[in-house]
Amino acid sequence: MSSHSNAIVAHKHPSDVEGAKIAMWLFLFTEVLLFGGLFILYAVYRYQYSLDFHLAATELNASLGAINTVVLLTSSLTVALSIEALRRGNRKLSLWMLFITIVCALTFMVIKYFEWSAKIHHGIYPGSETLLTASSGEIVFYNLYYAMTGLHGIHVLIGMGVLGGMFYFIARKPINKEAINYDVVERIRGGSRMAVLADDGRELGDVINIDDKVERVEIKVIYENTPEKFDPRNEIKLENSGLYWHIVDVIWIFLFPLFYLII
Amino acid sequence: MASRAIVDANEHQEPIYLDYRGRYDGILGWILSTDHKRIGLMYLAALVVFFLAAMTLGFFMRLEQWTVGQTIVDAKTYNTLFTVHGVIMVFLVVVPGIPATLGNFFLPLQLGAKDVSFPRLNLTSWYLYMIGALIIFLALFTSGGLPDTGWTFYAPYNIRTTTNIPLAVFGVFILGFSSILTGLNFVTTMHQLRAPGMSWFRMPLFCWGLYATGWIQVLATPVLGITMLLVLVEKTMSIGVFDPSLGGDPILYQHLFWIYSHPAVYIMILPAMGIISEIMPTFARRTIFGYKAIAYSSLAIALAGSLVWGHHMFTSGQSYTANVLFSLLTFLVGIPTAIKVLNWVATLYRGAIRIEPPLLYALSFIFLFSIGGFTGLMQGVLNVDVHLHDTYFVVAHFHYVMFGGTVMGLFAGLHYWFPKMFGKMYEKSWANISWALQLIGFNMLYFTMLVMGYNGMPRRYYDHLIEFNAGHQLATVGSWVLIAGILIMFANLLHGLLKGEEADDNPWGGTTLEWSIKGLPPLENFDEIPEVTQGPYDHNPEPEVVK
């Protein structure tokens, strides 16, 4: 339907942009506290076994960690650019930036894979014989290393899924269909006529009489967006996805020095 | 006020929520409905089932203590009894309890909103709750037998037990998710969907309780989540951080567990306090005494209550400095709590008090919760706690707060809002009888336990010394009276639901927005979003009262 119409369109739950942002920030708090528990454990054990932690940390590959940090920081930039591009109506650029973000995430996971495999190849993994012969502090260091980077890795994977979903939502042909079931038959029965009116009062299409034979009224609205325009709800969705991606990045910013740099 | 037909389709522009026919009929119309009222009732139905199941386990625990030595179950079975009783009651009943049931139903109604901010997320929470419950029940009846670690899953019990702890803690993790999403949803709803004119300080106090609760749910639950995940990976992938043989420290498990689980008791109690703040002004027919003090004290309890977890661990080996600090903070929580209690009592002063079942339940809340609070302060004293730690005193204190507090609050709320939820009225005489039985049975059971604990009866023992036998028998008889009271109450409510008389629109003379709705709430609650021009408890004397 190209022109505006006066058909009764009731949005059941009007999208509340501000509410969505509040909820997302609350969710980010939960992420901070989820990792917060692990950071407390890290702090306590680092205090308890400072020498063992020092020895164990020298085994980690700081350059791989640094590369991964650069990769994640870049992805944070591109996801921010993607949001800004969508806000300015440049869907194509937004999609490209999103694509780069997802590629960065994938790169991060691949590097992580090689890093972990090298460690596992050397017999350093939870419950391994090599590790169990090490000192208590080293065992705890590696257990924390696997727990924290592992949980972070899961978050990267979830983030990839979320961003991939956003890519699909933004890329797909912008057609919206809405079926509105209106339980108004009783009220408009008997001589009522139903029509869709344009802004100027013109009747669009046929006028339907609502007589006793009508059992229910269902209005289907299909509106196609022009190529430049897009579903405005995508904007807040993308922004929230971006926020999630930033927290994944921020957590890594703390993990990197704690495991790789402080030795 | 004459009784009117409640189910009157023409009264509202939309069908009432029980009659609404959406895309789906029958049971699908419920389990796929995003209507907050239906979701609230679905929670309630599940909750009642879980409550009765765990109550039955409690019944058998008490029965075991009838004689010295083995009465009906052996020691191992007794361990599983108190574990499963605790897990179900804490994680499936009292934590989700009031917010998920009455909170879901009445938060949007009290705010003058059509629904919560995220209705689909709300339904998701319910599914997560049911899935979490299902996983826990699977864990109970699969490999290795029922968990026997106590509801706290303490290390090293959780390390050494052969029972299916990984699955159980995963269930708790999922339940945590459900709780977080509910809290997030409610906080956003209160920020965004208050009716025009409803400033923060015109918001009913039940909402304030839920607001403080929502923040704790969001901020504390993730810590439980990570703790449960760590137990899970420790058991399944030997990524140990609590197991001493892997260099871990079991005390840290206790710290992380209580960083969540102490604030969690405020998740449990704050909404109940909110209900009491609704009932007091309604039945005293005057505005609440100290509205702002009660509202702020909810936040103060949430804040201070998040910093006192160490008082569970006075004897577990933490530094003396930490003990002193945690003890001090524990006493501080007593202040906002006492403010609430004093304000409720002051509300009754010079009120036109009407004794009805909801008020009776609310009064028993104040009585029992006060005992719970004071015994809590006693345990906050460092040297006294050494004596009381891990005795029946702690168990009794906990039940005074959680059962006498939260569950009594829930019962009070059910009796208060029952007519608005179902349009029917229960038998008030039976409600009074069941209330009296509960109050008597409760104190026979738990006050006796307080005394026994003070005299040194340790918790979690399936056996006892002969000198405790009389006390145990008294407590066991008390448990029968209590259970009888609870069963009569549920039977009465069920009877009211099925065959009760039709209730008036506003049988108690409540002043909050939910009572302004004629009959049962329609699908989207209000035909027109109300404009709020006054505080929530403005009991203007009505003309007939003046005459």
Image (tube, coloured by chain):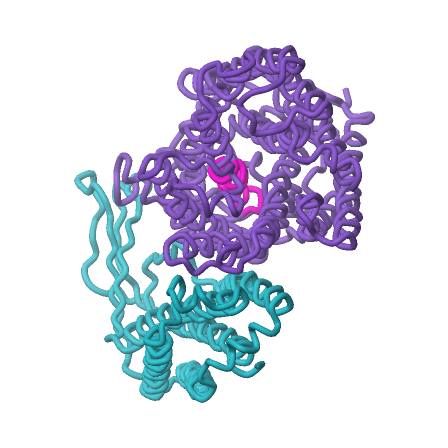
Chain colours: A cyan, B purple
- Specify the quadrant that holds the C terminus of chain A: bottom right
Picture coordinates of residue A66 (x, y %)? 47, 87
Count of numbered badges drawn on the protein: 0
Of A130 and B29, the residue lying toward us: A130
Verify whether residue B88 appears in magenta: no
Seen as rendered, the residue at the extreme front is A133
The vertical placement of B399 against A209, above or below, is above
Q: Looking at the image, which residue is at 49% across and 16% down?
A: B70
Q: Decide if residue A26 is on the left or right side of residue B202.
A: left
Q: Position of residue B514 (x, y in %)?
A: 56, 37
Instruction: Identify which residue is drawn at 70% across, 25% down.
Output: B456
| Residue B531 visible in the current orientation | no
| Image-quadrant location for residue B482 | top right
Q: Is residue A181 left or right of residue B517?
A: left
Q: Is B479 left or right of B42, judged from the image as shown?
A: right
The image shows residue A73 at horizontal and vertical percentages of 47, 85
Q: Is residue B91 magenta?
A: yes
The residues colored magenta run: B90-112
| Prevailing secondary structure of the magenta residues | helix
Query: Which quadrant of the view contains residue B321?
Result: bottom right
Q: Position of residue B204 (x, y in %)?
A: 65, 43
Please state, as top left, top right, bottom left or bottom right, where the N terminus of chain A lies in the image.
bottom left
Q: Nearer the viewer, residue A114 or B201?
A: A114
Residue at (61, 15) in percent of width and height: B472
Residue at image point 77% right, 52% down? B320
Residue B156 seen by the camera: yes
